[in-house]
Image (cartoon, rainbow, N blue to C red):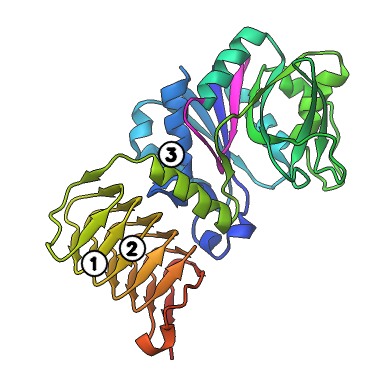
Amino acid sequence: MKAVILSGGSGVRLAPLTNTITKQLLPIANTPTLFHILELIKEETDIKSVCVVVSEDYGHQVKDELLSSKYNKHFDFDFVFQDKPLGLAHAVQITNMHIGDEPFLMFLGDILIAKEELKKAYEKFKKDNSETLVLLKEIDDPRPYGIAEVDNGKVTKMVEKPQNPKSNLCLSGIYFFKPSVFYAIANIKPSYRGELEITDAVDYPIQNNKKVSYYVIENWWFDIGTPENMIKANEVMLADLPNKISSTISSTSKISGKAFIEENVSIEDSEITGPVIIAKNTKIKNCKLGPSVSIGSNVTLENSKIDSSIIREGVKIKHAVLSNSIIGKNVEFAFNPESVNGIKTMYIVGDNTKCMSL
């Protein structure tokens, strides 16, 4: 079996973070989302071959990151460039030559799920002998998603973004396909959006009396396509990190809760409340951090309070009070103490930006 990971898309909802990087490389708990996916595939399947569909804008960035990562030793990577966003089914179709006659896992590159879920779905697909197995998740409002109607262990109908859904089971963005899906895609028509919809491709065998089975995700699932979901996913994944402190912390600082602190981190006159992760070569002075904060490498924090936030590498922050924020790489963020007044504020700041108070 092989895998296809879709790593294109414009990431408009994550701008300005995606002005300089594709959303699949944005970090959750200091690790790119794409790497979290590869780790799951590595640990929970026997897949060794991965085809990554990338956009023209950021495709080379994704390719360089993967080929220089530890996963290049475990997987054989192929890369396919999708020159126009013509739909998820189109993105799958252009991998035909790379997949050949093997069944495959399709995974959207901006989806995160808890451990063990992929393994259970993988085992079910191998036993079910169905054309397709879709991973579903029960949600409160399925209208923004494709949804599946099910009966007696089978999917009976697929509907894309229904206004009056008859089911609360949304498509998770993870699928197992037999190669017959390429025939299905060749026989569907573009939707009103001008795209080949993956829901139509899954629905095609259903309408032709073929079995499509499903697995309902029991634990957490996140589509990290919005800042709010990135922050929620970060909170959940931080809770799963081991407690490990690899730096000497000053006696004037206090750490409570789970903390993953890398080498050469300096923490003075500060209070850290886990779960947090702090990458190497970071300096923290007179701060209150946590819970649920990710700090990248080579960051400098002074006289600040930060919780439920993602701070990327190379950032410098002074006199700030941040909550539910995402700060891009190499940002300089400083306020006069008089302008802060202890009010927590949400900020989404793109890379290489200066934010200074007057």
Task: Return the x and y of residue 25 as percentages of the image width and height.
Answer: 47, 48
Q: Earlier in the sequence, mark 1 or mark 2?
A: 1
Amino acid type at image mark 1: Ser
Q: Secondary structure at mark 1?
A: loop
Task: Return the x and y of residue 132 as percentages of the image width and height.
Answer: 70, 19
Amino acid type at image mark 3: Phe
Number of other residues with Cα within 10 Å of mark 1, as a class: few under 14, some 14 to 19, many 20 or more: many
* Vertical arrangement, residue 200 with respect to residue 263, above or below: above
* Res 270 label: 1
| Residue in view at x 42 percent, y 83 percent | 340
Which residue, given by chain and number where applicable, does mark 3 sit on? 35
Q: Is residue 38 left or right of residue 99?
A: left
Contact (Cβ within 8 Å) of mark 3 with mark 2: no
| Residue in view at x 24 percent, y 61 percent | 282
| Residue range of the region highlighted in magenta in the rendering | 100-116
Q: Secondary structure at mark 2?
A: strand
- Mark-to-mark CA distance, 1 and 3: 31 Å
**Of tags 1 and 3, which is closer to the observer?**
1
**Whether residue 54 is visible:** no
Contact (Cβ within 8 Å) of mark 1 with mark 2: yes
* Vertical arrangement, residue 310 with respect to residue 188, above or below: below
Residue 71 sits in which quadrant? top left
* Vertical arrangement, residue 111 with respect to residue 296, above or below: above
Amino acid type at image mark 2: Leu
* Vertical arrangement, residue 252 with respect to residue 192, above or below: below
- Mark-to-mark CA distance, 1 and 2: 8 Å
